[in-house]
Image (cartoon, helix red, strand yellow):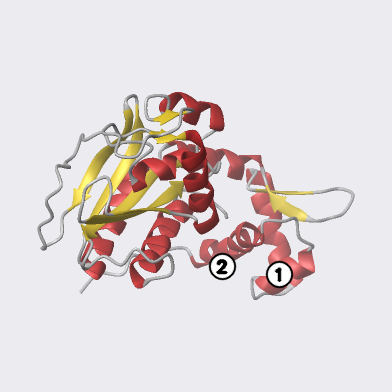
Amino acid sequence: MKKERRGIQSVEVGGKLLTVLVDEGTPMLLRDLAQKAGMTSAKAHPYLVSFGNLGLIQQDPQSGRYELGHFALQMGLISLQRVDPVKIAIPEASLLCDRIGHTVALAVLGSSGPTIVHMNESRHAIHVRMRTGTVVSIANTATGRVFSAFLPPKQVEKLTAREVTDDTIVAGQTDKKISKKEHEALLADVRQHGMARAVGEPIAGINAISAPIFDHAGNIVLAMTIIGPMGTLDPDWNGETAVELRKSAARVSEQLGYTA
């Protein structure tokens, strides 16, 4: 059995006040803060005085409301700087792979484009030449479209220059370029549904659904993508696979400090 470690009860009791301030996200009056923390105002006040001395909370002299202080802010910033998005996402990707039975890949935006940095391969083999280090198309894959939809427009324009053209695409054309109009329509679809999909493309017989993962500042830092055969991977926006992917990506974003 795991040995229970001894703690300081008063610290844990006072910590409830800090938890409430974090959960509420707005300055609070003493009575409301104490009530939310499950204690009386008289009991809460000494804790708040001590937290104020440490810089963990501060009180507005005009309104009397309490909020997190400068030291709490410094702690949060240091914590965010130490966060590794890939490290946090890997366990979630593994669990997702086990639940849905399909391959799950994580990608970051590298210097050459969206780059696979981790893969959880399913028990069902798929004929896809993709492994860690593979750079995928930014315009013609679900992973690439997620980055295109949520990156700054100027950055997207530069990244997609080789794959998106202003010219009309001729039917049967062998290269993988798409028109600017088509690309913009695809990205609008991605933003509407909060994820991207590729049905039977760019690899015939393979479907993919990809969701963005955001950091505390709302920047896309990862794409989590499910890949599987057309016959077994349902690409429906509201299907079970898409729902599970949305939940997994949202959990990772939340751990990175993102608030929708």
Report the side of 209 relative to 67 (left or right).
Answer: left
Q: Residue furthest front?
A: 171
Compared with residue 243, is residue 60 higher up or lower down, i.e. above or below? above
Say what secondary structure mark 2 lies in.
helix
* Residue 217 falls in image quadrant: top right
The residue singled out by tag 2 in the image is 13
Q: Is residue 142 left or right of residue 203?
A: right
Query: Residue 157: horizontal and vertical position, in percent?
Result: 49, 27
Q: Residue type at mark 1?
A: Ala
User: Which mark is on residue 76?
Assistant: none
Mark 2 → mark 1, Cα distance in angstroms: 11 Å
| Residue 9 makes an appearance in the image | yes
Quadrant position of residue 144: top left
The residue lying at 40 percent from left, 56 percent from top is 249
Point out the image quarter for the N terminus.
Answer: bottom left
Residue picked out by circle 1: 34
**In the rendered view of the protein, which quadrant contains the C terminus?**
bottom right
Residue at x-position 38% and y-position 38%? 139
Q: Nearer the viewer, residue 249 or 40?
A: 249
Q: Label 1 crowding class (10 Å Cα cut-off): few <14, some 14-19, many 20+?
A: many
Q: Give how far across and how far down residue 109 sits, in percent.
A: 37, 34
Q: In front: 90, or 154?
A: 154
Q: For the point 51% across and 46% down, which residue is it?
A: 185
Quick check: 110 left or right of 57?
left
Percent of width and height locating residue 148:
45, 38
Q: Position of residue 28 (x, y in %)?
A: 76, 60
Which callout, 2 or 1, points to the residue nearer the camera?
A: 1
User: Could you tell me which secondary element the residue under label 1 belongs to?
Assistant: helix
Name which of mark 2 and mark 1 comes first in the sequence. 2
Residue type highlighted by circle 2: Val
Rendered residue at 64%/76% (across/down) = 38
Give the side of residue 208 with respect to residue 41, left or right. Answer: left
